[in-house]
Image (cartoon, coloured by chain):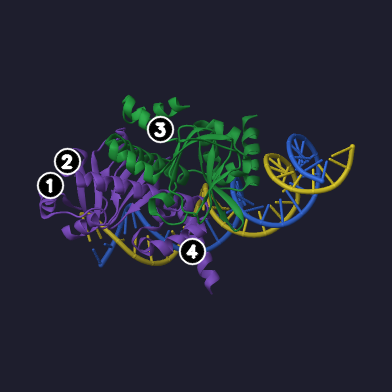
Chain colours: A green, B purple, C blue, D yellow
DNA sequence: CCCGTTTCTTAACTTAAGTGAACGGGGTAT
DNA sequence: ATACCCCGTTCACTTAAGTTAAGAAACGGG
């Protein structure tokens, strides 16, 4: 499990054994059961999540309806916006599958960053890269129809379509479950 | 003009006179005429843009159609994704109004950052904050209809609706110009 | 000032998504 | 085994966005 974490980090900086041990001493790894709520609307966590195995999602509760806005799977990092702006969270974070997460909190990070400046560099690279990726995702969403978005998802994250409930996928695509169902039927019509 | 820049920076770090002078010596300020293309699809710039006055936009050219994905106005920063991932740009950057921009390039930034670590701190805070903002914008877009998105825009950036051509606004909202026109008519119907 | 272009609006028609309701399969609890 | 609930699908109907076309208004250059 820890190798997944180190593999991920090595994409950004290289670590000495000392630094690796410092990380391991932090007791980061946690098993989380499917359905667990990691964060509720209105709460104010300091925790960030790195998915080693499994899947978690963020969703808003609007007019009694869950609106899923993101899925995080293996090698994805989720820093809730409430950690950054210190306001109460506007969304929920829930565990889609039984998962293993690396959970770090802001105080720990400050401590580690001051001991090992390397992590600071990694954080900066990471947030720059996430920003760029996020922007591309947003642009793609804006410039395509629900059907195109679904087809794109099939290309880019085919696993998601399999492992995630359809109604969560639907709101992730910005539509209702019935529309997703219809849209899928339409597509398989075309193929024949 | 330079006060706008310093006001902006002071939101993140405080500068000494030395640091301010170092910045000013870089010859950052440029006037740009409406319609100028700052970056074309396929090009590979190293420049970042800070809008002191005016408005610039990013757009994709898809099937011969312009799809506007973002507007940047006073106090906004635009670092093209091609600066970060070093691949050719997938979009255009164009000047919506006669504008005054602070244009910096990546090499300059590296030099300045090494002399004044303070700027490095600012960059990190900035990209973290942009990431959080971008995420909220994306979530809002996903969870609302075109009409809601237009009404939200009226609340949050009323100036944009005035100063930007309707067909650019439409694609920014993810719809066609005709639909925006109709949607506006629908709204003003409701009011009466 | 005029002409051509671009931009915005309106309209009629097509297509797709939203809505409300019903059905059936799979799982769970009693 | 039965009753229940959750989920995905389907259907009929409503509503809104896409498409095509046309005309009016605003803009810019010569």
User: Of helix, strand and loop, which one carries label 4?
Assistant: helix
Q: How many angstroms separate mark 4 from mark 3 (CA)? A: 59 Å
Q: Nearer the viewer, mark 4 or mark 2?
A: 2
The residue lying at 16 percent from left, 43 percent from top is B112
| Pointer 2 and pointer 1 on the same chain | yes
Q: Which of marks 2 and 1 is nearer the N terminus?
A: 1
- What residue would you read off at disc 4? B184
Q: Which chain carries label 1?
A: B
Which chain is home to disc 3?
Answer: A
Q: Do the residues labelled 4 and 3 touch (CB within 8 Å)?
A: no
Mark 4 / mark 2, whichever is N-terminal: 2
Residue A125 appearing in the image = yes
Secondary structure of the residue carrying numbered label 2? helix
| Circle 2 Cα neighbour tier, 10 Å, few/some/many (<14 / 14–19 / ≥20) | few
What residue is drawn where x is 17% and y is 41%?
B108
- In this figure, which residue is indicated by the disc labeled 1? B26
Depth-wise, is mark 3 or mark 2 nearer the camera? 3
Residue under circle 2? Answer: B108
Give the number of the mark in front: 4 or 3.
Answer: 3
Which residue corresponds to mark 3? A25
């Amino acid at each position: 499990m820890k190798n997944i974490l180190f593999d991920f980090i090595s994409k950004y900086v290289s670590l000495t054994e000392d630094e690796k041990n410092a990380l391991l001493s932090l007791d980061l790894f946690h098993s989380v059961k499917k359905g667990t709520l990691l964060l509720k609307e209105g709460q104010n966590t300091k925790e960030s999540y790195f998915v080693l195995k499994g899947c978690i999602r963020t969703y808003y509760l609007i007019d009694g309806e869950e609106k899923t806005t993101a899925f995080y799977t293996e090698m994805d990092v989720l820093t809730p916006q409430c950690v950054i702006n210190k306001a109460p969270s506007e969304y929920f974070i829930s565990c889609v599958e039984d998962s293993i997460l690396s959970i770090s909190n802001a105080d720990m990070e400050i401590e580690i960053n001051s001991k090992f400046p390397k992590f600071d560099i990694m954080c900066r690279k990471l947030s720059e890269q996430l920003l760029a990726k996020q922007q591309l995702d947003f642009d793609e969403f804006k410039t395509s129809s629900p059907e195109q978005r679904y087809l794109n998802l099939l290309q880019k994250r085919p696993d998601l379509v399999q492992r995630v409930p359809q109604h969560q996928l639907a709101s992730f695509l910005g539509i209702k479950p019935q529309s997703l169902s219809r849209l899928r039927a339409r597509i398989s019509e075309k193929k024949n």
